[in-house]
Amino acid sequence: MTVPTVISAGDRRRAAVAVAAGTAIEYFDWMVYATFAIYFAPLMFDAADSTSALLQSAAVFAVGYLLRPLGAIVLGAISDRYGRKPALTLSVAVITLGTLLLAVAPTYAQVGVWASVILLVARALQGLAYGGEFGTVAATLREIAPPQRRGRYSSLFVVSAQGGQLAGFVVLLILQSLLTREQMTSFGWRLAFGVALLGALVVVYLRRRMVESPVFAAAEAKPERRGSLRELFASHPAATGLAFLMVTLTIPTMLTFSTYIQKFGVNTLGLDPRSVSFASAAILVVFSGSAYFWGILGDRVGPATLLLVGYVGAGLLSVPAYLVMVSAPSAVTVALAAGLVVLFVAMFGSVQQTVLASLFPPHLRALGAGFTFAAALAIAGGTTELVALGLKAAGHESWHFWLISVLALAGAAVGLSVRRRVARATAEQGPAARPTTALEQTEAGTY
């Protein structure tokens, strides 16, 4: 086949928009589930109290995380063998189906335990799709970006992800303003999933029209280079281990201050749900608004350096932020304390995708980045809320914040190893390794 070596500016923009829009919808749906759980959880489970219902809802949430590695393997293989475009289109189509099930799911009072089963099936479908989404998104953003702008292209993932979560909070605030609590419990939460469904249909259209990655096209021209899980572990064990640890040790901090903070404000601090929603929305504005600027800085100082600073900052500030919030509980305190931590979370989150993707060659990129990210989420991300709620139920909620602080600082040690790996790889390349073709320029500059 003819391998395209240049991607036009227009095709680059359309591909970036299609990728970012899908990520936004993914995280919009994710946030809708997390924030609207206080309304629909008591309807879907036979729970004696609100904390128990939230725990059961979080358990279903965790199932979606546990299935992500399988989705990463399946869709990652599709992406590395058949193209970024078909993998991205398939993933959002499956997400759409799961969202449809959530929007029309019957309640426990209507069908008994089948309500929980339908909820579980919906989250399982979305977990499979989400698992395959990340690796292909990371690969696509890296491969369509000019080498000197990989940081800001990588930051599009965080901007769109947090923008999607922010949109979820905006929908929550609008519905809370227009509907009573009884109406929110009755049908308001379904409207939010309906919005997610419409957005997913738009993304399917956008992704069907996007251009294929030229780097994938070049790899496709070499049929002997077809990645597999066996090759991933056999040929790239160090990269796989580093990628896995990078996410495992830091995702609990990200989830705590971007998602769990809403439940923390209502269930622990006893604040009004609407005021906590405003605080959470402000936090997401900080997250999304700062990420692109961090990406620009990453292009100047190096993504690996920015990654390391972000890990250290988030680790050092997590416990002080918790102490401030519990000592002076208010929506303003939550916004300010958590928002400060989120500045550093956005710092490492803005460049994490391009660093992960660059650890693997093109024929293993979607599988490598996707599987390690999904496996880490299954272990650390899917259990973050369960651990936090479990420690709260045991009367030791502060332990959760100490735990995420220790994990983030341990992640900094991994980030330092990645940074050294970057410096070594750059030194080994030397000035003689200057790219000569447009395609080589696309792949030049490992980090």
Image (spheres, helix red, strand yellow):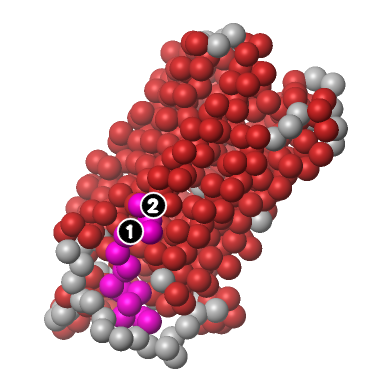
Report if residue 151 lies within the magenta region: no
- The kind of residue tagged 2 is Tyr
The magenta stretch is 205-220
Which quadrant of the view contains residue 391? Answer: top right
Where residue 234 sits, quadrant-wise, is bottom right
> Which sits in the foreground, 318 or 27?
27
> Which x, y percent locates residue 127?
61, 51
Q: Do the residues labelled 2 and 1 touch (CB within 8 Å)?
A: yes
Q: Where in the figure is residue 379, as x and y percent of width and height?
A: 65, 52
Secondary structure found at label 2: helix
User: Dividing the image into 4 quarters, which one contains the C terminus?
Assistant: bottom left
Q: What kind of element bears circle 1?
A: loop
Mark 2: few/some/many CA within 10 Å (<14, 14-19, 20+): few
Which residue corresponds to the image point at 71% horizontal and 40% vertical from the top-left?
A: 119
Rendered residue at 65%/41% (across/down) = 101
The relative height of residue 431 versus residue 180 in the rendered view (above or below) is below
Residue at 20% across, 62% down = 146
